[in-house]
């Protein structure tokens, strides 16, 4: 019986819970937008790194192909 009593005490009434959610929304809204911006920046950086890796691989493949066509030993 005591556990049920503690549970009822630890819950927040509906109006207070709504008010807390509203305050939480106002406080964390900016942080959420910043997190989204940071995540998008990370995606763009990953894409740039992937493109750079592909470009470097094409250059390496061209060098290897060029050397092989000239009979150079690798």
Image: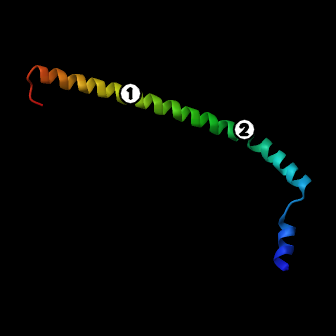
Residue 19: give x, y in percent of width and height: 87, 49
- Image mark count: 2
Residue 66 left/right relative to 49: left
Q: Quadrant of residue 4?
A: bottom right
Residue 30: give x, y in percent of width and height: 72, 38
Outermost residue, bottom side: 1
- Label 1 near label 2: C-beta < 8 Å? no
Residue 30: numbered disc: 2
- Residue drawn at x 32%, y 27% as measured from the top left: 56
Q: Quadrant where the N terminus lies? A: bottom right
Residue 45: give x, y in percent of width and height: 49, 31
Residue to which mark 1 is pinned: 52
Q: Quadrant of residue 60?
A: top left
Relative to 24, does residue 4 appear above or below in the rendering? below
- Residue drawn at x 9%, y 25% as measured from the top left: 72
Give the secondary structure at mark 2. Answer: helix
Relative to 49, does residue 11 appear above or below in the rendering? below
- Residue drawn at x 41%, y 27% as measured from the top left: 51
């Amino acid at each position: 019986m005591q556990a049920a009593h503690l549970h009822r005490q630890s819950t927040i009434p509906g109006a207070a819970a709504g008010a807390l959610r509203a305050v939480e929304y106002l406080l964390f809204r900016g942080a959420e937008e910043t997190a989204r911006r940071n995540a998008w920046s990370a995606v763009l950086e990953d894409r740039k790194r992937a493109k750079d890796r592909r470009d470097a691989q094409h250059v390496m493949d061209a060098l290897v192909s060029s050397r092989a066509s000239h009979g150079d030993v690798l």
